[in-house]
Image (tube, rainbow, N blue to C red):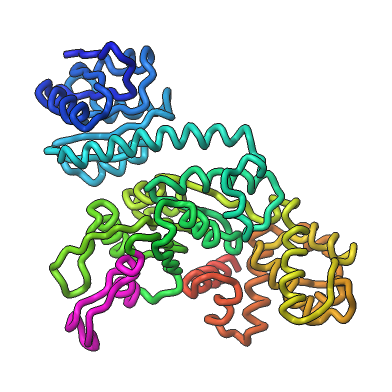
């Protein structure tokens, strides 16, 4: 069977079951979507895709001649922009992960609920449009083109690299997609997540930020999902978790790679089914929450090494925004420094209105392992010591992140990993070995700090 509508369509449905093809066609048309192209012979798919401009291909997994997985792989290699949804009669986690790895947007098991099918296809088409829009931003990275520049006033930026980040945030904000934000500690991931929330269709709802790495393994499940009275010893009353607290708004999960495998599975269930169960309860609670996650680690590497579940990653990574480190956007350093100078001079009731040339030069050449957060700490501490109207380099000499008035040749030859290690050890010394306080100053979770310290010991 092969059916191609007279009017151009963005949808191709592939299945060797002709009855199912006609049923899906009727479902889509009755929901107001365009009539799809239908094909039952999998050998015809690539020829049709090359001839017609499809945005979405719905693929059966098990078909004679050419399997859906083979078509998916070939399709994404030749036409990576086309969204693909796998539909199969067999529920198999490994096949689902493999399909998502090859680039499938979603994986559905037959019999498919008609309402869910329409929602998935609609969102896949929406993501195709969004990705096309994001691709155009690669050619135009200017702040003047922003539709809502006022939303980004809190993130001082002049570098073109951040213009791209802002455009991406503007594009994904109105959608319902999960967003993954990556970047080193201190780059402003939580602030950007808050901006995405403010520009979404749920700005009046709560924005709940959770640092996963800051919670103990035993308490995090309770804090995320809540519990009912009597669920365990000490559970004297019902308790809402973070998911329920964020109802109608956004839940931001920072350091998501610190989530334990068992909780990753429970998170996947919430994402897929949009319901959760409090600890000690069999009552399903509907969840209306937009999920934004962030990590300062290489999450692709975490998935490859099986420390983070691939099926969870692909669900969270519907849209990805990467914030470059401060050292890669030099144009932002001095505007940010002056911004923090103004804030902390006013806070400390000091009349300091400029940076000395040597201090400015030092900042421009400093690697900032702690990024924007570290820059603010440097300026805030320097303001406390400064006695004149100009913030000088000498006022910052006592900071643990500075080894002197200028970088030495040895400093310049250090790798970023070594700079980070030395910075963490300096802060740890400054706090008298207090790991909790050190993690707070560095802006990372306690478990993240412990993991880094262990890696330093192994490298010795």
Image quadrant occupied by the N terminus? top left
Q: Is residue 213 magenta?
A: no
Residue 201: x %, y % from top left? 41, 51
- Residue 89 lies left or right of residue 368; in this view the side is left
Q: Is residue 243 magenta?
A: yes
Work out whether residue 449 or residue 39 is closer to the camera in this orientation and state it: 39
Image quadrant occupied by the C terminus? bottom right
How many numbered discs? Answer: 0
Q: Residue at x 45, y 69 (%)?
A: 211
Where is 120 relative to 194, above or below?
A: above
- In the image, the segment drawn in magenta is 218-246
Residue 216: x %, y % from top left? 38, 76
Q: Residue at x 79, y 72 (%)?
A: 403
Q: Quadrant of residue 326?
A: bottom right
Work out whether residue 136 or residue 51 is closer to the camera in this orientation and state it: 136
Residue 399: x %, y % from top left? 75, 77
Q: Residue at x 67, y 83 (%)?
A: 430
Q: Quadrant of residue 385?
A: bottom right
Work out whether residue 173 or residue 127 is closer to the camera in this orientation and state it: 173
Q: Residue at x 22, y 70 (%)?
A: 278
Q: Is residue 29 visible?
A: yes
Where is 51 relative to 443, above or below?
A: above
Q: Is residue 418 visible?
A: no
Residue 397: x %, y % from top left? 82, 76
């Amino acid at each position: 069977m092969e059916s191609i509508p007279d009017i151009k369509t963005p949808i191709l449905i592939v299945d060797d079951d002709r009855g199912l093809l006609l049923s899906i066609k009727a479902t889509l048309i009755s929901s107001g979507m365009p009539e799809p192209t239908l094909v039952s012979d999998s050998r015809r798919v690539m020829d049709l895709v090359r001839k017609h401009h499809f945005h979405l291909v719905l693929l059966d997994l098990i078909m004679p001649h050419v399997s859906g997985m083979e078509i998916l792989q070939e399709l994404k290699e030749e036409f990576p922009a086309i969204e693909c949804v796998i539909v199969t009669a067999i529920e198999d986690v490994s096949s689902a992960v493999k399909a998502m790895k090859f680039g499938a947007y979603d994986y559905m098991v037959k019999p498919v609920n008609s309402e869910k099918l329409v929602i998935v296809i609609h969102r896949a088409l929406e993501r195709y449009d969004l990705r096309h829009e994001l691709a155009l931003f690669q050619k135009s990275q200017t702040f003047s083109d922003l539709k809502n520049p006022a939303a980004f006033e809190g993130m001082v930026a002049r570098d073109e690299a951040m213009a791209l980040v802002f455009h991406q945030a503007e594009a994904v904000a109105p959608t319902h997609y999960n967003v993954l934000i990556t970047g080193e500690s201190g780059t402003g991931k939580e602030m950007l997540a808050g901006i995405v929330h403010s520009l979404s269709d749920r700005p009046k709802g709560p924005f709940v930020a959770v640092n996963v790495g800051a919670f103990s393994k035993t308490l995090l499940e309770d804090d995320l999902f809540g519990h009912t009275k009597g669920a365990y010893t000490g559970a004297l009353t019902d308790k809402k978790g973070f998911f329920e607290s964020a109802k109608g708004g956004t839940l931001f999960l920072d350091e998501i790679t610190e989530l334990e495998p068992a909780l990753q599975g429970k998170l996947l269930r919430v994402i897929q089914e949009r319901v959760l169960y409090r600890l000690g309860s069999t009552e399903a609670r509907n969840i209306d929450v937009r999920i934004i996650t962030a990590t300062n680690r290489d999450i692709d590497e975490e998935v490859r090494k099986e420390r983070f579940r691939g099926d969870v990653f692909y669900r969270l990574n519907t849209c990805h925004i990467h914030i470059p480190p401060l050292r890669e956007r030099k144009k932002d350093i001095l505007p940010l420094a002056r911004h923090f100078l103004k804030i902390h001079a006013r806070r400390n009731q000091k009349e300091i209105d400029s940076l000395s040339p040597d201090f400015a030069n030092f900042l421009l050449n400093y690697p900032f392992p702690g990024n924007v957060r570290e820059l603010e700490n440097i300026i805030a501490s320097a303001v406390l010591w400064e006695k004149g109207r100009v913030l000088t380099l000498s006022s910052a000499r006592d900071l643990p992140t500075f080894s002197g008035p200028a970088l030495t040749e040895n400093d310049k030859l250090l790798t970023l990993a070594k700079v980070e290690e030395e910075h963490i050890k300096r802060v740890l010394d400054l706090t008298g070995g207090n790991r909790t306080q050190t993690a707070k100053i560095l802006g990372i979770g306690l478990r993240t700090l412990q993991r880094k310290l262990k890696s330093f010991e192994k490298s010795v």
